[in-house]
Image: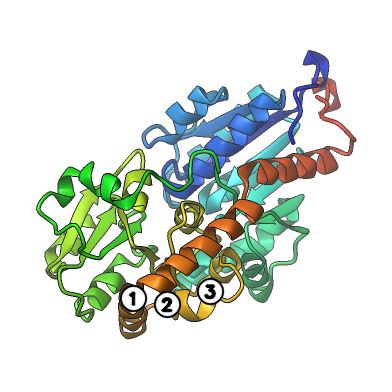
Amino acid sequence: MLQKSCTEESRLTVLHLVQPVEGGVARVVTDLVAAQVRAGLRPVVACPPGGSLASEAAAAGARVCLWPAERVPGPRLGREIATASRLIRACAPDVIHAHSSKAGLAGRLAVRGRVPTVFQPHAWSFEALEGRAAGMAMAWERFGARWSDRILCVSESERRAGQRAGIAARWSVIRNGIDLGRFRPGCGQAAARAGLALLEGVPADAPLVVCVGRLSRQKGQDVLLRAWARSPVGDARLVLVGDGPYGDELRRTAPAGVVFAGASGDVRPWIHAADVLVLPSRWEGMALAPLEAMACGLPVLLSDVNGARESLPPGHAPHCLVPPEDPAALAAALTALLADPALRTELGRTAERHTRSVFDVTKTADAVLGLYRELVGQSRPTTRKRTER
């Protein structure tokens, strides 16, 4: 485990450059900086205002700096790079950890290898794009890899996707982890449902399916709604937990039995109330919501994108994986799971054991710290003098 043995003179300063500031990326960064504070490091988070990251990282003990940056590259990119460069000079970090494609773009252009740099894509940008834009993103990643001392992937499939795209890099794979003290089985499904006002009037034995994620093209809720219209499961309810740019469109096209819960600071009540968690993503690195659900003993149904197979216990794929963007396959798998309570119970039990043995966030944080130490070239965290820069 991470230790608290660092002296003031030997503390490693890590600058996390981050965009976006919500969802899974924000949770990963917050968990990392909390562990790094406990270890005696000096984590600094540079991120845009808004979202949850700035306040949560500060609460975890990180120093937070404002870095105004749009989610996608645009006419302000030059200014964003210049601002990142000033923050890097002021912070004088031992390691820069750039999270997601936009921060990876601006951060690597700002520092250009002068400070050990980790780039963590959190899913490849070129998988989210089409046509010329995808080609440009892929070309940049091939070029920008020269300024990454390490590209950190959260799954082997994410790494393989980068290699297939022609990215020549020094790779590390450190799987996502979750807080296993926070995500664990609850006090019972009935009690969880009773505490959720949006389920008032829903029959106590009605099947409940939950999808947790930003309402966006990436997470594929539109595919799920088309699948739901094909699923003849009586009084069943589908709850979409989250908010995002696709919210209005999804509400307009939702069939009967769909509940929009909005954004939630704590998704555990919905996980504890559900029979199945579904995440029909179009692309991922390794999604956190399925790990959180499985740690609570809930079976999951996922599209077979990067990280999904690696999330699941052995033997779960035939029941829990479907091709991406395939409403018919998703509907069939969902109907089969909802019709078989014994199978769901067994899948949930083995999922909990597997997740608790493999996806502990403390192990993830330990491995990331080990990577930092390797890059700085010392056996324990040290802070290089400014004169060495």
Residue, far top: 8
Q: Earlier in the sequence, mark 3 or mark 1?
A: 3
The image shows residue 197 at horizontal and vertical percentages of: 16, 43
Mark 2 to mark 1 CA distance (whole Å) = 14 Å
| Image quadrant containing the N terminus | top right
Tell me if 336 is positioned left or right of 53 in this view. left
Q: Earlier in the sequence, mark 2 or mark 1?
A: 2
Q: Which residue is mark 1?
A: 334
Could you tell me if residue 267 is visible in this image? no
| Image quadrant containing the C terminus | top right
Q: Which mark is residue 316?
A: 3
To which quarter of the image does residue 140 belong? bottom right
Badge 3 marks a residue whose secondary structure is loop
Residue 176 versus residue 320 in the image, above or below = above
The image shows residue 358 at horizontal and vertical percentages of: 65, 55
Badge 1 marks a residue whose secondary structure is helix
Q: Which residue is mark 2?
A: 324
Q: Earlier in the sequence, mark 2 or mark 3?
A: 3
The image shows residue 78 at horizontal and vertical percentages of: 51, 43
